[in-house]
Amino acid sequence: MIGFLVKQITLPSNPYYNLSERAVLQCQMDAIMIQYPQLNRAENSEPQYSEDIGDGFIFLRARERYGHLQSGIIGVKLREWFITEETMHSNPIPANWEGPKIRRWARMRPPNGQVARCAWKEMEKPLDKVRQSRMVKITYNGQIEFAEAQFYFFGVINQKSVPLAAVELFARLDPTLFEESSFTLWSVTRLDDDEGVVIISAKSILSVVAIIPHKVPGQTAQDKPRFFVWEQFGLEVALWSEALDNPSDAADSVNLLSEE
């Protein structure tokens, strides 16, 4: 940051005063861009190989090169969700249909300029490289919920391609802790996979949030780990980080066998 500010100084006199003034000006500009990200043309530009899904949402790479069936509980939930959706449109489902073959996307940028990542890619990284920006605030069944994004993808429903996301929901907040904290602490636990894994519209993701571990008095080893939600955690850092990202970010690395 110091080097960035020094490069902006053009007058040799009073260097420390000039540096302070440039720092104040930069902070003011950052504050405006964070409050009104739509003003930042650089942030609103579409990165190379991205996919505009409409309404200010953009899918970002890495992306798998070929579509394939998903395994485990996510594969089960995908099949159930697609069957339900196609049935609603009165479309027949083959009896031997195993499920959709999808290509996963690693990141998505909502209209606020943040970049939501996902467990698919982040779990592959060493701990010192993980960005931890895969926790998201969403709307689901008419309510505000918090979830961990698993991946993003396009699905075909009634012969139309729609942008979707697989997420794992957190439980609703603990009402006692919420009330005792003067309605400020949103303390949650993870739901079991069978209940927590759901398929949602990618456009129902509102923002990236922090889901931070915490303990409560009387908590035992048998209790589920608890987390508290912190919105707009380090938002300015997230926007700066994404703006300075190198196109060869490890999240966008190419696996010649399965990704591009």
Image (cartoon, rainbow, N blue to C red):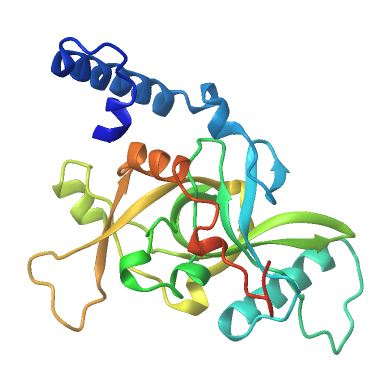
| 173 vs 200, nearest the viewer | 200
Query: Can you see residue 141?
Result: no
Left or right: residue 21 versus residue 36 is left
Rendering coords of residue 156 (x, y %): 82, 62
Determine the image quadrant of residue 5: top left
Query: Can you see residue 201?
Result: yes
Name above or below for residue 26 compared with residue 213: above
Residue at image position (43%, 77%) is 192
**Quadrant in the picture for the N terminus:** top left
| 122 vs 79, nearest the viewer | 122
Residue at image position (19%, 47%) is 179
Residue at image position (50%, 74%) is 195
Name above or below for residue 123 compared with residue 89: below
Left or right: residue 134 versus residue 16 is right
Rendering coords of residue 138 (x, y %): 50, 50
Left or right: residue 74 versus residue 129 is right
